[in-house]
Image: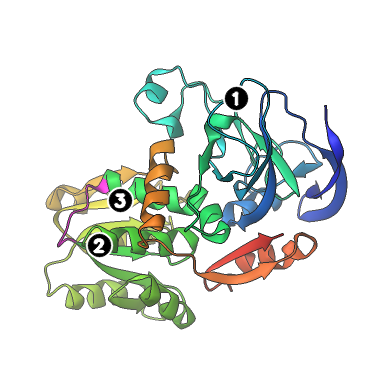
Amino acid sequence: MAGAPVKALSTEAVGSLTLREQPSPGHDGRVVVRSAVAGICATDVHLLDGFLPRPDHPFVLGHEGAGVVASVPSGVTGLRPGDRVVLYSPLVCGRCRECARGREEVCADPRGQLGFSIDGTFADEWSAPASNLVVLPDSVSFELGALLGCAGLTAVHAVRLARLGAGDVAVVNGVGGVGLMLIQVAAACGAAVLAVADAAEKCAPARQAGASDVVVLGQGGSAAVIAELGELTGGRGADHYFDLVGTRESLEAGIDALARYGTAIVLTSSGDLAGFDPRAMLLKQTRLIGSLAGSLADLHTAVRLAEQGALTAQIDRRYALRDATAGLARIRNREALGRNIIVW
């Protein structure tokens, strides 16, 4: 049974958001969470603008969320009202081969995802299965916690796939939400991190996250970036390249910047890689890995890193729910210097 009405930010048409009232979510076997913070992700912009498929309007965006458990359905153990929690947004079967191996991000029988196919966290209250909620330690803020549920776990997952180790040199191309978390996770593993930014204004957040040097993509394009990264690595090249740009140019530049037996990890794609030439990979014996979000175990690791102080939140702007369209616009216009969040 749904409760009293709550406010939610809903897509009413492509590119349009409306603040409206809707019933508070009922249990239906799920835990109801009262929102404290919701992260505004670039993926939310893609969904809003119609670049990614989403359900029919109206639909509530938001897949990053942290808050306080408001109510727990009968029979659920391990959570109680008042607990501070962060959301793991994909709903998975829990029974397939991949789920059994702790690879929920590639579940063979997914049941949907909050903010993608099920109403998400841009609301005063939302609900999720108990298995999709991870308790936040008191020392981890709601602001940081919300971001761990997407950017944090994605960064942990990519670093694990890369098999990054202490003393390695890692290049992170793209210093948005995930990139800033990636820099921190790689640095926590003992790597020297070089960042590539598309604007000089993004150098400070990258250095604050732990990058020892930041290369700015300028008029010289990728060739100049490769040359500068070569100088910074003493001509040897990097051990790992994390691509958060996802173009043919960015991937080819990354592979050129790698040392022999280096690893290129692709976390996004603009869809223009069809003409990619793999010869440079063959000559260097490069590993090319795709990295998709992360598992529930990756989220637990991200929470532990945050508890240890190895992960922090770099906030660009804070918005009330009614003003969140301004945060989406900053991301769309590539103006964000850190993360934009909705706070209650």
Report the front residue among 280 and 158: 158
| Magenta segment main secondary structure | loop
Residue 283 horizontal side relative to residue 97, left or right: left
| Quadrant position of the N terminus in the picture | top right
Identify the residue at horizontal 64%, vertical 54% (top origin).
38
Q: Callout 3: 10 Å neighbours few (<14), some, many (20+)?
A: many
Instruction: Please name the residue that numbered disc 3 is placed on.
Output: 159
Q: Residue at coordinates 55% horizontally, 69% vertically from top-left?
A: 315
At numbered mark 3, what does the secondary structure look like: helix, strand or loop? helix
First in residue order: circle 3 vs circle 1: 1
Q: Name the residue under label 1.
A: 76
Amino acid marked by disc 1: Val
Left or right, 109 with reference to 44: left
In space, the residues marked 3 and 2 are separated at their CA atoms by: 10 Å
Q: Please give the range of residues in magenta.
A: 162-168
Residue 13 makes an appearance in the image: no
Q: Residues within 10 Å of mark 2 (few under 14, many from 20)?
A: many
Question: Disc 3 marks which amino acid?
Answer: Val
Label 3 – label 1 distance at C-alpha:
33 Å
Question: Which one is in front, 308 or 232?
Answer: 308
Nearer the observer: mark 3 or 1; the answer is 1
Q: Mark 2 belongs to which amino acid?
A: Ala
Which residue corresponds to mark 2? 170
